[in-house]
Amino acid sequence: MPFLYQTFYNFRNIKNDTIDLSHREVYFVGENGQGKSNILESLYYSAYGISFRTHIDSQITKNGQKDFSLNSLYNKQESDTQKISIIYENNKKRIEKNGKKIQDRKELINTIPCIVFCHDDLRFAVGEPECRRFFLDQSLTLYDSTYIDDLRNYKKILKNRNQILKTHEYEIIDVLDNQLAIYGLKIQEKRKKAVFQFNQIFGKIFEEITGIEGLKISYDSSWKEKDENGNRIFPTVETILNHLYERRENDKLMETTMSGPHRDRINFILNNKMFIPTASTGQCRLVALLLRVAQAVYYTKTTGQKPVLLMDDVLLELDPEKRRKLTSLLPEYDQLFCTFLPGEPYEKYMNDTTKVYKIKNGEWYE
């Protein structure tokens, strides 16, 4: 099993020192506010060095404390047991892998591939365009460290370009445009490929659960891909530079870069129409859940590895029939960690080896 155990010090309201995670399926059962999600958060934090609930590390410490630490032991393969240690003290974070300090969180990529399902995922369906861009970028960065570099470079160049647009000092704008086009094109190409692969997965599972056929994800680049006659233009650095030049006066007027991957749009289309604006709340929640399922399947197809699934009270949002169908369609996984309220029928999903912890006031009991 990937996760074997985890030890805690001043992490959230967790009171026990060590938890045994050496089971393929682990359920955490308890009332709201008792600490179930904190344990899932700690697993995610060990995998990526960051929380899925906040980007402010100081918010993770136990009340009244300033420091915290996590130690996780996991088996990536049978003969490959490794330890991740994360120490936050004096407002600084240190991450160690097998006792060696790592300089960049991207060094954790593909070490413990966790896919988290949580309530906030609804923003991928109904939130602002940047939320869907974030989901797509996250799907790519789960395994591709070069994509992380491309994103970082693009954002740095974009920041510099926007700065000179604000100060009206345009001397190096041609140089920045060339760099923006190079890195932006790399991002655009990888996003397009990812959306194509997602559409081989997402629409099928949505149809299996709802009976609605033909839902797909569309990726609309803000960089022009058609000429004035409507003919498709194959994007190159040169065509993007032409586009940026044509829009430059408008960018100067607005004092910001109005096109590029940071303005791309990802939408859900059914029968050539936007699906989300007319979808029910239940359908929107299902779209968000199935995006995570598709993300896990996509990861396995791309890397050949099975992920660790973290499911935080998400089955509660579905009616019993859709819940049954979703659990039957979960992708293959190395481990599954779920949280449940006491009244939920979690026994229906268990097998003989499932480990169940009862959670109360930050402590767990078997």
Image (cartoon, grey):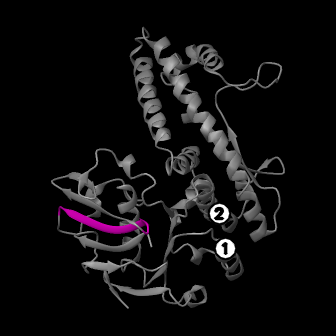
> Is residue 296 shown above or below 232?
below
Residue under pointer 2: 290
Question: Distance from label 2 to label 1 (Cα)?
Answer: 8 Å
Determine which quarter of the picture holds residue 237.
top right
Extreme residue in the top direction: 171
Residue 130 at least partly seen: yes
Using residue 188 as the reference point, say whether residue 86 is left or right of it: left
Give the magenta part as a residue range.
Answer: 66-78
Residue 185 versus residue 287: which sits nearer the camera? 185
Residue 47 coordinates in the image, percent (x, y): 39, 60
Looking at the rendered structure, the kind of residue marked 1 is Leu
Looking at the rendered structure, the kind of residue marked 2 is Leu
Determine which quarter of the picture holds residue 42.
bottom left
Question: Which residue lies at the image location 83% right of the left edge and 60% below the top edge?
Answer: 213
Q: Secondary structure at mark 1?
A: helix
The quadrant of the picture occupied by the C terminus is bottom left
Residue 260 at least partly seen: no
Q: Are marks 2 and 1 in contact (CB under 8 Å)?
A: yes
Question: Which residue lies at the image location 52% right of the left edge and 22% below the top edge?
Answer: 254
On residue 326, the disc is: 1
